[in-house]
């Protein structure tokens, strides 16, 4: 698919890290491993989930590229990427991750903000 659709690789790197980070945040709150924004036991700022998603998403993008580099070192004939591909992938992941946190409207301008306003400790009201 990477060879059939131009820029598919960039699209995947733009969408995947932030989306997975946002889903991971929701799962962890739902499992009560992270406090919900409106938890009575903690004063979590409404922007904290957005920051968490960005940090985890960018970390995932960088970790993915470390993995690609490792595979390229072990089996160079399997991976034919270069420095430019790596930098573009990192750039796409870094730009896409905040987009996962600020995808849609609401008065805070973030999808996570809209979710926070409509939940109590990770459970929709």
Image (spheres, grey):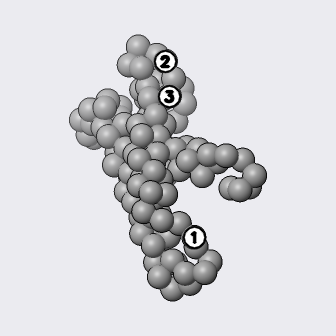
Instruction: Tell me if 12 is positioned left or right of 61 in this view.
Output: right
Q: Residue 46 bears which disc, if any?
A: none
Q: Which residue is mark 2?
A: 105
Front in this rendered view, residue 18 or 68? 68
* Residue 4 location (% of width, % of height): 75, 52
Give the position of the N terminus as an image quadrant.
Answer: bottom right
Instruction: Tell me if 9 is positioned left or right of 63 in this view.
Output: right
Q: Which residue is mark 3?
A: 103
Front in this rendered view, residue 38 or 19? 19
Distance from the alpha carbon under mark 2 to that under mark 3: 7 Å
Q: Is residue 59 visible?
A: yes
Give the position of the C terminus as an image quadrant.
Answer: top right
Q: Secondary structure at mark 3?
A: loop
Distance from the alpha carbon under mark 2 to that under mark 1: 40 Å
* Residue 102 location (% of width, % of height): 44, 29
User: What residue appears at the point 42 percent right and 20 percent down from the top-left corner?
Assistant: 109
Q: Earlier in the sequence, mark 3 or mark 1?
A: 1
Q: Residue furthest left?
A: 43
Q: Which residue is mark 1?
A: 80
Tell me the crowding category of disc 3: few under 14, some 14 to 19, or many 20 or more residues within 10 angstroms, Cα based.
Answer: few
Front: mark 3 or 1:
1
Considering only vertical position in the picture, is 28 above or below 104?
below
Q: Secondary structure at mark 1?
A: loop
Considering only vertical position in the picture, is 9 above or below 15?
below
């Amino acid at each position: 698919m990477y060879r059939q659709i131009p820029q598919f690789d960039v699209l995947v790197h733009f969408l995947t890290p932030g989306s997975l980070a946002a889903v991971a945040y929701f799962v962890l709150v739902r499992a009560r491993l992270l406090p919900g924004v409106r938890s009575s036991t903690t004063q979590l700022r409404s922007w904290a989930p957005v920051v968490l998603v960005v940090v985890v998403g960018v970390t995932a993008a960088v970790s993915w590229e470390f993995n690609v580099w490792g595979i390229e070192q072990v089996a160079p004939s399997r991976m034919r990427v270069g420095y430019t591909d790596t930098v573009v992938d990192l750039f796409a992941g870094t730009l896409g991750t905040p987009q996962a946190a600020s995808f849609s409207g609401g008065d805070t301008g973030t999808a996570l903000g809209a979710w926070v306003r409509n939940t109590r400790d990770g459970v929709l009201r």
